[in-house]
Each structure stands twice: as structure tokens, then as C-alpha cells.
Image (cartoon, rainbow, N blue to C red):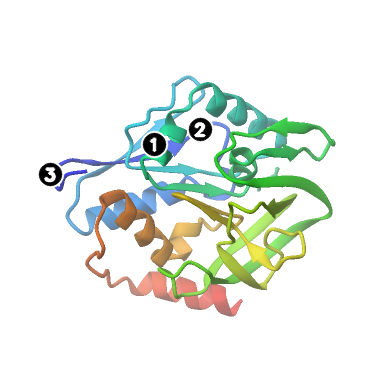
Amino acid sequence: MTSQSTVRIGLVLPDVMGTYGDGGNAVVLRQRLRMRGYDAEIVEITLSDPVPDSLDVYLLGGAEDSAQRLATRHLRQYPGMQRAAERGAPVLAICAAIQVLGNWYETSGGERVEGVGMIDVTTSPQAERAIGEVTTTPLLPELSDPLTGFENHRGGTTLGPDAAGLGTVTRGVGNGVGDGREGVVQGSVIGTYLHGPALARNPELADLLLKRALGVDTLAPLDLPEVDQLRRERLRA
Ligand code: GLN
């Protein structure tokens, strides 16, 4: 992308995926870009739209089982995001979106649904729903600050050999299959069970997505005491 053009932030299927204000992740990215002098806009892709492959970054939120199934069908039918990810466009998948982008997931009713196949994970319902605050130590070398968010999911996600964890759990459940991992990283896809919305609570993760979207190594730092305070409160809670 060139420095003159508008950065286009894809908010994917907010009509069916976006529990707990996950759409706020798009607002955070747009604001962090504008504060640095970039033009930025949010492009909402709904179930009525084919998914374009031309956007700079793609964001997907969480969902309950039936909504999740509609999203899976749509993304398989219109593989624009898959093409974009192959050229390196960053994708952030929250909670149910991890499950949707994986190889398959089982609903809480026990039915197996074929996923989009972008990340090497599978998901099955666990005996107990995971609900509460989560803190992790990031495993990506570009991240050093603890990740914070809250989780609410019954699915437990197993990472296959092509997928790595996003963080090591220090509080909460995370992927929920006993390996101490939270989230997933594969190619340009980052998945996490963290709601919050995640990018409001984790500015370092927001800026990592922006650096990748812009193709730059560094971004001007932003001095936002209210974000620091939010993090202090949540990490202490
Ligand atoms: N329905 C999925 C589960 O319970 C995801 C829930 C969510 O996105 N919050 O595992």
C-alpha cells in the first residue's frame, strides 16, 4: 500500500460475528491510524456482500453457534479474505472466528462443521464453558507486553503442526485443551479468544497488525494515558 492511499480496514460479517463489541477492534485501528496522519476507513462486509481480496487488514469477531455457521458458509463461498491472507494481508480472528477459520469445529450440539481451512486448528466443545479474565505472555517475538482480555467460549481449540500459540496463559483458560496456550498464529492470521475488544486493551497487538498492513517496521508512538490506565486496571483485576 502507498502512503497516499486510504488504509481500508475490513470488518468481516459484523451482522453475524461481533459479540462483546468486537467491532471496536476496527475503530481502534482506524483511530490509531488517523492519530498518525493516515487516512483510514472501515469497510463492513455483510452476508449480502462478496468478500473483497483488496483490503489492507481483515477483522472477524466472535459469535454463537448458528451465526458462526452462516459466517463459515459465506467465507467458503467467497474466498477473498483467503486470497488476501496469501499475499500477506493481516487477519485478526476473535473467538468463534478462530473456530470458523480452522479445519473443522464441532458445535455444542455435537455436529461437525467443515471450516474455512486457513489455520491448522480443530475445535470441540469442552465439559465446562470458559468464562472470565485472561492474561497471557505473548509468544510472538514482536510482542513484549502481556495480552489481556476476557473469554466466553465452550469450544476448546487444538493446534495442529502448522499453527503456533499466540500466548502462554498466566490467568484464565485460553484454548482450553490443556497445553497452556491461548490463541493461534499461522502465516498472516492471528487468532485469539480475547474479547475486550482485544485491540483496545492491547495496543501493541493493534500496532503489529498496522505495521503489517502498512508494510512498515515502525510506527510513531502514541501517548494515550487512558489506554495505559485501562491496561493497569484490567491486568490488576
Ligand atoms: N460459540 C463459540 C463457543 O462457545 C464461540 C463463542 C464466542 O465467540 N464468544 O466456543
Q: How far apart are marks 3 and 2 (CA)?
A: 28 Å
Residue 61 vs residue 45: left or right? right
Q: Distance between the residues labelled 2 and 1?
A: 16 Å
Q: In which quarter of the image is the N terminus?
A: top left
Q: Position of residue 144 (x, y in %)?
A: 44, 75
Q: Where is residue 129 in the image (x, y as percent from the top left)?
A: 79, 54
Residue 84 bears which disc, if any? 1
Density class for disc 1 (Cα within 10 Å; few <14, some 14-19, many ≥20) is many
- Which residue: 45% across, 58% down? 199
Dot 2 or dot 1, earlier in sequence: 2
- Which residue: 72% across, 39% down? 105
Amino acid type shown at disc 2: Leu
Of the pair 16 and 162, the residue shown nearer to us: 162
Q: Name the residue under label 3.
A: 4
Dot 1 or dot 3, earlier in sequence: 3
Is the CB of mark 2 within 8 Å of ligand 1? no
Amino acid type shown at disc 3: Gln
Labels 2 & 1 near each other (Cβ < 8 A):
no
Of the pair 133 and 208, the residue shown nearer to us: 208
Instruction: Examine the rendered structure and indicate whether residue 150 appears above or below residue 22.
Output: below
Q: Mark 2 points at which residue?
A: 13
Residue 145 vs residue 95: left or right? left
Please state which of the two labelled residues, at mark 3 or mark 2, is closer to the viewer: 3
Determine whether the residue tagged by mark 3 lies in a helix, strand or loop.
loop
Labels 1 & 3 near each other (Cβ < 8 A):
no
